[in-house]
């Protein structure tokens, strides 16, 4: 019994979150008094200490949190929550732990994000940044210490941006990412990351779907990112910037043309980007006075004339013609893709799909005329439709050869062969692909 009692005493009792707010505010009050003293305010050290005081007051409630912490570690680090429950953001439901200064969100027992619900002091990061700037201004030799302080502020803002985005606080995320970038511009740090502006712009663009006023801020961030030389590998920045302009069209109709110009720049640089192409087709089909969709073809064809072996351009051309329901030109474009790069899976896969789409279109017309056919005409028309579908078969088989066991390719082959099961040798192919699809479906 005595040994058991000792063991119990050795186990720490779980405590609630503790934040010594008064002590943190006292440091700031002391700093306020120091900068009010002309002699002390003239010293860089005074401002370095002030920056540190504001930083510590800002991060104190969440300083022990980091992504993927086990829930048990969170309890040890910040104490027991006041309450627990669940909360849903978008389509994702999280386990939520409520603390005095934040709510933590878990999935599978690991911390994935948190939302700050209270603060020791408002606007602490901005005031810390101002203090470090003053220290550098008074004595540029403090640059290493100022840089270290700025790095802490920047990392905090990056983390805040990430967790805010996860819990769909897009405004908070956008402001945090932008604040981090602006601090990186300081001469003592001087290592700006334009991607932070991109992240800020994307956050505000998404927020614009619920709060249209956010589109203006998104436009500003994304434009600054482009001016700073940022480009993501797929050119998505042009798609998001398009939405920012287009989302402001009711207040400023002239921005519709600005949206168009943005997409045209994007498709010129990234002709394979489906989102950009979809945005262009949306504009051309839903907005008056935007122009003829043939402009897109002219743009791409002119680019191809200058660079005829550019697979991306041929890829984009095929996607544009598909959007215009011109399947023959889509097919011609993707035939060129497969000629230029015979081992490209996507080239064969999309070529096969466009043959299927052309067959579907022909089949629809066939069904509309069904009642007017004589027996001979019916058989001849059906043969023509099936001949289109048959062209897809070897192309998709080549795609599967290049990417074995691709489920989408196998599914399309299964469906296609069932459609063509009365053609010579195709029923055996259907049985083969049907068995393979069932096998892949169960894996």
Image (cartoon, grey):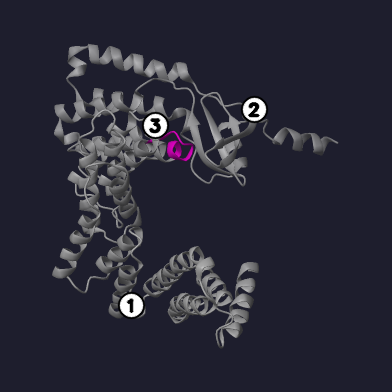
Q: Is residue 148 left or right of residue 58?
A: left
* Magenta segment main secondary structure: helix
Q: Which residue does the image show at 55% across and 23% down from the upper left? A: 100
Span highlighted in magenta in the image: 163-173
Q: In which quarter of the image is the N terminus?
A: top right
Which residue is identified by label 2?
83
Q: Quadrant of residue 70?
A: top right
Nearer-the-camera pick, 194 or 264? 264
**CA neighbours of label 3 inside 10 A, class few (<14), some (14 to 19), many (20+):** some
Q: Point out residue 338 in the picture as x, y percentages from the top left corner.
A: 33, 77
Left or right, 190 with respect to 31, comes to left
Q: Can residue 148 be seen in this view?
A: no
Q: How crowded is mark 2: few (under 14 residues within 10 Å), some or many (20 or more)?
A: few
Crowd rating for badge 1 (residues with CA inside 10 Å; few <14, some 14–19, many 20+): many
Q: What element carries label 2?
A: strand
Residue hosting label 1: 338
Q: Mark 3 points at which residue?
A: 172
């Amino acid at each position: 019994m005595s040994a058991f009692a000792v063991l119990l005493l050795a186990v720490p009792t779980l405590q609630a979150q503790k934040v010594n707010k008064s002590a943190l505010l006292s440091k700031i009050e002391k700093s306020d008094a120091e900068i009010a003293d002309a002699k002390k305010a003239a010293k860089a050290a005074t401002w370095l200490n002030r920056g540190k005081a504001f930083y510590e007051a800002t991060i104190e409630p969440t300083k022990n949190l980091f992504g993927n912490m086990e829930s048990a570690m969170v309890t040890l680090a910040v104490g027991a929550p006041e309450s627990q429950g669940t909360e849903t953001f978008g389509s994702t439901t999280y386990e939520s732990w409520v603390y005095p200064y934040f709510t933590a969100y878990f999935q599978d027992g690991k911390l994935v994000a948190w939302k700050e619900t209270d603060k020791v002091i408002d606007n602490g990061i901005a005031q810390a940044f101002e203090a470090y700037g003053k220290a550098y201004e008074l004595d540029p030799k403090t640059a290493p210490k100022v840089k270290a302080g700025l790095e802490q502020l920047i990392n905090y803002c990056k983390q805040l941006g990430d967790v805010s985005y996860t819990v769909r606080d897009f405004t908070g995320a956008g402001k945090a990412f932008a604040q981090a970038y602006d601090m990186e511009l300081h001469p003592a740090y001087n290592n700006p990351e334009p991607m932070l502006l991109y992240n800020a712009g994307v956050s505000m663009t998404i927020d614009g779907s619920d709060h249209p006023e956010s589109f203006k801020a998104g436009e500003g961030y994304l434009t600054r990112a482009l001016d700073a030389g940022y480009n993501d590998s797929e050119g998505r920045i042009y798609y998001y910037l398009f939405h920012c302009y287009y989302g402001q069209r009711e207040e400023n109709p002239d921005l519709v043309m600005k949206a168009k110009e943005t997409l045209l720049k994007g498709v010129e640089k990234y002709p394979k980007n489906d989102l950009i192409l979809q945005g262009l087709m949306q504009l051309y089909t839903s907005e008056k006075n935007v122009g003829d969709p043939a402009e897109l073809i002219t743009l791409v064809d002119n680019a191809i004339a200058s660079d005829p072996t550019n697979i991306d351009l041929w890829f984009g051309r095929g996607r544009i013609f598909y959007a215009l329901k011109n399947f023959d030109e889509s097919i011609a474009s993707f035939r060129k893709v497969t000629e230029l790069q015979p081992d490209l899976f996507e080239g064969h896969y999309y070529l096969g799909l466009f043959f299927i789409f052309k067959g579907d279109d022909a089949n629809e017309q066939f069904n509309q005329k069904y009642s007017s056919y004589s027996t001979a005409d019916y058989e001849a028309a059906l043969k023509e439709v099936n001949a289109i579908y048959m062209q897809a078969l070897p192309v998709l088989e080549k795609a599967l050869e290049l990417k074995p066991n691709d489920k989408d390719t196998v599914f399309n082959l299964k469906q296609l062969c069932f459609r063509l099961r009365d053609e010579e040798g195709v029923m055996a192919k259907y049985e083969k692909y049907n068995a393979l699809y069932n096998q892949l479906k169960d894996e």
